[in-house]
Image (spheres, grey):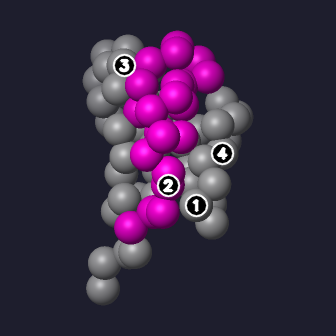
């Protein structure tokens, strides 16, 4: 069964940026994460109970970042 889509306000998403590099995010509903769009950074930040946790210490490296 697929995970439910995150319920994030589009206006909020439009102003959020990666705290490490200041790039925009793309939403990964399947993993409940916000993924930095900068290929050199590409950190994945968790979203818990529809609240983005934008702490670098809580982020994980994605495969995109590991290949650079």
Q: Is residue 57 left or right of residue 27?
A: right
Is residue 47 positioned above or below 25 on the image?
below
Label 3: few (<14), some (14–19) or many (≥20) C-alpha neighbours in 10 Å: some
Q: Main secondary structure of the magenta part?
A: loop
Answer whether residue 15 is visible to the viewer in this image: yes
Q: Is residue 8 left or right of residue 57?
A: left
Does the magenta segment cover residue 10?
Answer: yes
Residue range of the region highlighted in magenta in the rendering: 5-25
Is residue 19 positioned above or below 55 on the image?
above
Ranked by sequence position, the earlier of labels 3 and 1 is 3
Q: Is residue 29 left or right of residue 19?
A: left
Ranked by sequence position, the earlier of labels 1 and 2 is 2
Which of the image's four quarters has the C terminus? top left
Residue nearer the viewer, 15 or 26: 15
Say whether marks 1 and 2 touch (CB < 8 Å). Answer: yes
Q: Identify the residue position indicated by label 4 in the image.
A: 53
Q: Identify the residue position indicated by label 2 in the image.
A: 8
Which of the image's four quarters has the N terminus? bottom left
Q: Identify the residue position indicated by label 3 in the image.
A: 38
């Amino acid at each position: 069964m697929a995970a439910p889509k995150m319920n994030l306000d589009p206006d909020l998403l439009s102003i959020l940026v990666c705290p490490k590099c200041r790039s925009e995010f793309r939403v990964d509903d399947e993993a409940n994460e916000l993924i930095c769009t900068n290929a050199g950074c590409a950190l994945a930040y968790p979203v818990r109970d529809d609240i983005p946790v934008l702490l670098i210490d809580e982020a994980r490296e994605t495969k995109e970042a590991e290949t650079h």
